[in-house]
Image (cartoon, rainbow, N blue to C red):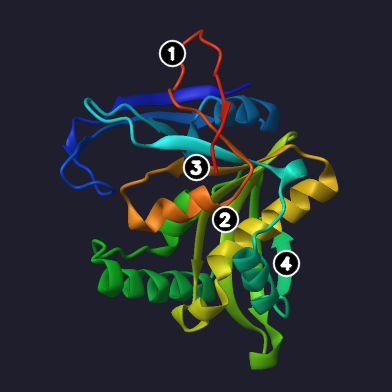
């Protein structure tokens, strides 16, 4: 049974996705959330980083649209098949999230590249930060690690995700920019879809689609998918609709 530790609503601030807009997040700091409860939260458009369960409550914008892939019906496009083939030689290891020097260094290498290429705000994570964001103990928490054995078992990408009774949820993915030509971010989503298909789970959650944000546009390319056009109020059932291709 989930235990609420703290409830926070941020004051409006500059949006990092669509800079002219003002953004605000509602946070529930929760402990003891079981996989079934996380399933319900995901269905209501809530996302998770560690013990922080959050959703947007922006005052004048509704561009953050929850999206999920219909795994049983999904067939990769030609470009997605190419991305899958380019990463086919990676060794894939699925397990609980870990904190170590290799993972933190990989995160910083990836983030520094984004800072240069996309003018992201500089971001540094300590091992404590990494633990709370990506490796906080949770029965649903998973890490998909990708290794290049031809380069001596080099760690090249990490996909942080959650597994619930009915879905997989892609939380965060980062990778070595030297492997960007292999499209590891796309490959990670495809890997989650394939796992969900094998397990008979209907959905892979991708978080929020934001049409005006270049870093998040890729989410619209996975079809068929459903979107949640409006986050439900307390006591209201979520109404997912099939998205147009």
Determine the secondary structure under disc 4: strand
Mark 2 and 3 residues: CB-CB less than 8 Å, in contact? no
Label 2 to label 4, Cα distance in Å? Answer: 12 Å
Label 2 to label 1, Cα distance in Å? Answer: 28 Å
Q: Residue at 42% across / 33% down in the picture?
A: 54
Give the residue number, with chain letter if any, for mark 2. 160
Mark 2 and 4 residues: CB-CB less than 8 Å, in contact? no
Label 4 to label 1, Cα distance in Å? Answer: 38 Å
Closer to the N terminus: mark 2 or mark 3?
Answer: 2
Give the residue number, with chain letter if any, for mark 4. 93
How busy is the neighbourhood of tag 2: few (under 14 within 10 Å), some, or many (20 plus)? Answer: many
Q: Residue at 45% across / 27% down in the picture?
A: 229
Give the residue number, with chain letter if any, for mark 1. 233
Extreme-top residue of the structure = 235
Q: Residue at 65% across / 52% down in the picture?
A: 142
> Can residue 51 be seen from the camera position used here?
no
Determine the secondary structure under disc 1: loop
> Can residue 78 be seen from the camera position used here?
yes
Q: Residue 85: x and y, percent? A: 70, 75
Q: Nearer the viewer, mark 4 or mark 3?
A: 3
Q: Nearer the viewer, residue 214 or 127?
A: 214
Label 4 to label 3, Cα distance in Å? Answer: 23 Å
Label 2 to label 3, Cα distance in Å? Answer: 12 Å
Q: Residue at 69% across / 91% down in the picture?
A: 150
Does residue 50 sit above or below 77 in this rendering?
A: above
Give the residue number, with chain letter if any, for mark 3. 207
118 left or right, relative to 92: left
On the image, which quarter does residue 151 sit in? Answer: bottom right
């Amino acid at each position: 049974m989930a235990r609420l530790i703290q409830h926070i609503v941020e004051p409006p601030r500059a949006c990092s996705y669509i800079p002219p807009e003002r953004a605000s997040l509602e946070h529930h700091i929760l402990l003891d959330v079981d996989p079934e409860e996380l399933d319900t939260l995901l269905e209501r458009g809530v996302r998770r980083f560690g013990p922080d369960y959050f959703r947007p409550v922006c005052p004048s914008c509704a561009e953050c649209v929850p999206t999920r892939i219909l795994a049983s019906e999904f067939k990769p496009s030609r470009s997605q098949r190419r991305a899958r083939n380019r990463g086919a030689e990676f060794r894939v290891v699925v397990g609980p999230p870990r904190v170590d020097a290799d993972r933190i260094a990989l995160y910083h290498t990836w983030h520094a590249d984004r800072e240069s290429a996309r003018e992201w705000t500089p971001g540094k994570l300590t091992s404590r930060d990494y633990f709370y964001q990506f490796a906080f103990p949770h029965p649903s928490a998973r890490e998909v690690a990708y290794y290049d054995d031809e380069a001596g078992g080099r760690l090249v990408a990490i996909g942080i995700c959650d597994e619930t009774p009915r879905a997989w949820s892609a939380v965060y993915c980062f990778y070595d920019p030297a492997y960007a030509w292999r499209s590891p971010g796309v490959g990670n989503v495809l890997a989650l879809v394939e796992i969900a298909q094998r397990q008979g789970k209907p959905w892979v959650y991708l978080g929020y689609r934001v049409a005006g944000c270049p870093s998040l546009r890729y989410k619209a390319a996975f079809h068929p998918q459903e979107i949640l056009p409006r986050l439900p109020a307390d006591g209201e059932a979520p109404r997912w609709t099939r998205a147009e291709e």
